[in-house]
Amino acid sequence: MSRIGGGADGPLGAELDAALRSGDPHACRRAVAEAVATAGPDDVLDVLGRHAAAGSVLGTELLVELLDESGVVRRFVRGALLDESAVDDVCQDVLISVAGSLGSFAGASKVTTWVHGIVRHRVVDHLRRQRATAPLPDDDVAPGARMSSLIATRATVRDALAALPDLYREPVTLRDIEGLPYAEVADRLGRSLGTVKSQVSRGRALVAAALGGAL
């Protein structure tokens, strides 16, 4: 149960629930920002996780955004991985795995506990690939690389991409369909390099969520 605003029925928690049910993205983002400022991200993630697991597209989008913006995933990955140069890639893999496996989130634990378990699996996979001494099977690739390939080659995946908000669809299209380097995508869109990398990660995660399969 959420503890936002002094209990599951607290005003901020109730406002966020109501906004998510209404499907109004502006009201939802306002409610998320207010709740995070008051109670921190953990309880807000629980509310978003419940809606996302129930099939809310907006709840999924906000969950992915908050996991990324709050630094929750990055903190977990950094705590388990010594290679700082690999943090961005593993964080992306975690976001994609979270979004693609929301159907397995039963709400019995906190979202952060569930996500921490996914982080452990993605870190282990990354280390296994790094230590491999023989060529790996073609299908043994990280979620981020796999999603990029699927977006570039499969029409059904492109349908999911087309349904994304412009904020995410544009950078993912330029990166994965047109094959532009991140720096060129940033220049073309007039956004910072870090912003583009984050938006591509989130966009790929939302495509994974739309496909409804764990990666």
Image (spheres, helix red, strand yellow):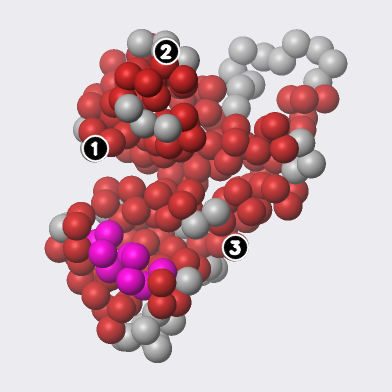
- The percent position of residue 195, horizontal first and vertical second, equals 43, 36
Q: Mark 1 is on which residue type?
A: Pro
For the question of whether residue 141 can be seen, the reply is yes
CA distance for labels 3 and 2:
36 Å
Q: Which residue is mark 1?
A: 165
The answer to which of marks 3 and 1 sits earlier in the sequence is 3
For the question of whether residue 107 can be seen, the reply is no
Determine the secondary structure under disc 1.
loop
Q: Which is closer to the viewer, label 3 or label 2?
A: 2
Q: Which residue is mark 3?
A: 113
Circle count: 3
- The percent position of residue 2, horizontal first and vertical second, equals 42, 77
Q: Mark 2 is on which residue type?
A: Leu
Determine the secondary structure under disc 3.
helix
Q: Which is closer to the viewer, label 2 or label 1?
A: 2
CA distance for labels 3 and 1:
29 Å
Q: Judge the density around disc 1: few (<14), some (14-19), many (≥20) Cα neighbours within 10 Å.
A: few
- Most common secondary structure along the magenta stretch: helix
Q: What is the quadrant of residue 66 in the picture?
A: bottom left
User: Which is nearer the eye, 28 or 51?
Assistant: 28
The answer to which of marks 3 and 2 sits earlier in the sequence is 3
Above or below, 57 relative to 152 = below
Q: Which stretch appears magenta?
A: 28-36
Residue located 33% across and 65% down the image = 32
- The percent position of residue 210, horizontal first and vertical second, equals 32, 37
Q: Which residue is mark 2?
A: 180
Judge whether residue 78 is colored magenta.
Answer: no
Q: Which is closer to the viewer, label 3 or label 1?
A: 1
User: Which is nearer the eye, 125 or 15?
Assistant: 15
Q: Judge the density around disc 2: few (<14), some (14-19), many (≥20) Cα neighbours within 10 Å.
A: some
Above or below, 20 relative to 171 = below
